[in-house]
Amino acid sequence: MTTPLLEVSDLSVGLRAGGVAYDIVRNVSLTVDQNEILAIVGESGCGKSLTALSILQLHASPPLQITGGSVVYGGSDLVRKTKKEMRGIRGSEIAMIFQDPMSALDPMFTIGSVLVSAVRAHQDVSKDVAEKIALEALADAGIEDPRRRFAEYPFQLSGGVSQRAMIALALVNSPKLIIADEPTTALDVTVQAQILDRLRALKNERGMSIMLITHNLGVVASVADRMAVMYAGEVVEMGAVSDVFAKPQHPYTTGLLGAVPRLGAGASDLVPIPGRVPQPDELPAGCTFADRCSRVVDSCRATRPDITVRGRVQVRCFNPVS
Ligand SMILES: Nc1ncnc2c1ncn2[C@@H]1O[C@H](COP(=O)(O)OP(=O)(O)OP(=O)(O)O)[C@@H](O)[C@H]1O
Ligand SMILES: [Mg+2]
């Protein structure tokens, strides 16, 4: 077995403020291998973004803090790194693409100057060389006429071009891993498809790995190699996309797949999951999905299930769909 590029083990992240103490992300374990796309899916509020942010120590701390576990990258635990060490890793080793490019790009600076400063923050190169790297990254991100975009300000870019500029910003220092948090949610479907194609091509051309957070199971099916399904701060199912789609085992995964529209199916074939995700401060004692689950048994309400290996997939459930 080869060593994974990133190994998150038993990671918990919680709120600790003013006498309040509860965990939001709970005992998350996952790996990202070299040259693969791992998708993280789950309904809104399941802790996908917080998991991603805490990997890079970008969570709002305080009031949030990592309360347990490790994030091993390149042989060392990122949880134990200093702020300065993390600044060295962010961008150059692991880069993040955020959902909303407009709030991530500073309106006062041209795209070119943002990219050049990002290059020079990590690489000891002249301004000319940094410009060349920045222009290449814009082209690599699929931007036509990079020279023109280089001189433009964020407000001059369309949503699709801004998102590509964010990808370019993530690429300038050739990271080994990109964490993309809903990189295409705000875009129309055509542009969404182009951006995802670009990410997939970059994975192949550069041998990079991508952790892709998305709500969209169609996106998962078309671009990801493996997937982790999150529910109420926990990973409830994880495995190869082909295995999970062919035979989902956690009732939540079955529910998510049942809520996806299919061509030719009527609206009545769409089965929404009843109820809602519990808030992190109101989690039940047993399985967090028990109240919404059609397969609930007594033990689900009494004890929290561990994640266990079933065939090629890992599942956190006492009564999985077999
Ligand atoms: N700074 C914070 N302080 C307190 N609670 C927070 C903070 N950030 C996130 N949370 C809580 O953590 C939980 C998980 O949030 P997170 O943003 O990770 O969800 P998500 O799965 O990314 O959802 P979405 O799909 O909507 O982006 C939510 O209940 C949220 O309210
Ligand atoms: Mg999110």
Image (spheres, helix red, strand yellow):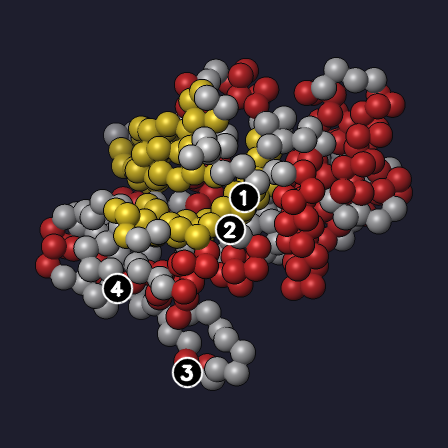
**How packed is label 1: few (under 14 Cα within 10 Å), some, or many (20 or more)?**
many
Question: How far apart are the two marked residues, 2 and 1, measured between alpha carbons?
Answer: 6 Å
- The residue tagged 3 is 268
- The residue tagged 2 is 225
Amino acid type at mark 1:
Glu
Amino acid type at mark 4:
Ser
**How packed is label 2: few (under 14 Cα within 10 Å), some, or many (20 or more)?**
some
Question: How far apart are the two marked residues, 4 and 3, measured between alpha carbons?
Answer: 25 Å
Q: Which quadrant is home to the C terminus?
A: bottom left
Q: Earlier in the sequence, mark 4 or mark 2?
A: 2
Amino acid type at mark 3:
Ser
- The residue tagged 1 is 36
Mark 2–mark 1 contact, CB under 8 Å? Answer: yes
Number of the front mark, 3 or 1: 1
Q: Earlier in the sequence, mark 1 or mark 4?
A: 1
Identify the residue at image location x=79%, y=17%: 125
Q: Earlier in the sequence, mark 2 or mark 3?
A: 2
Relative to 268, say whether 274 is above or below. Answer: above
Identify the residue at image location x=83%, y=17%: 126
The answer to whether one can see residue 55 in this image is no
**How packed is label 4: few (under 14 Cα within 10 Å), some, or many (20 or more)?**
few
**How packed is label 3: few (under 14 Cα within 10 Å), some, or many (20 or more)?**
few
Q: Which quadrant is home to the N terminus?
A: top left
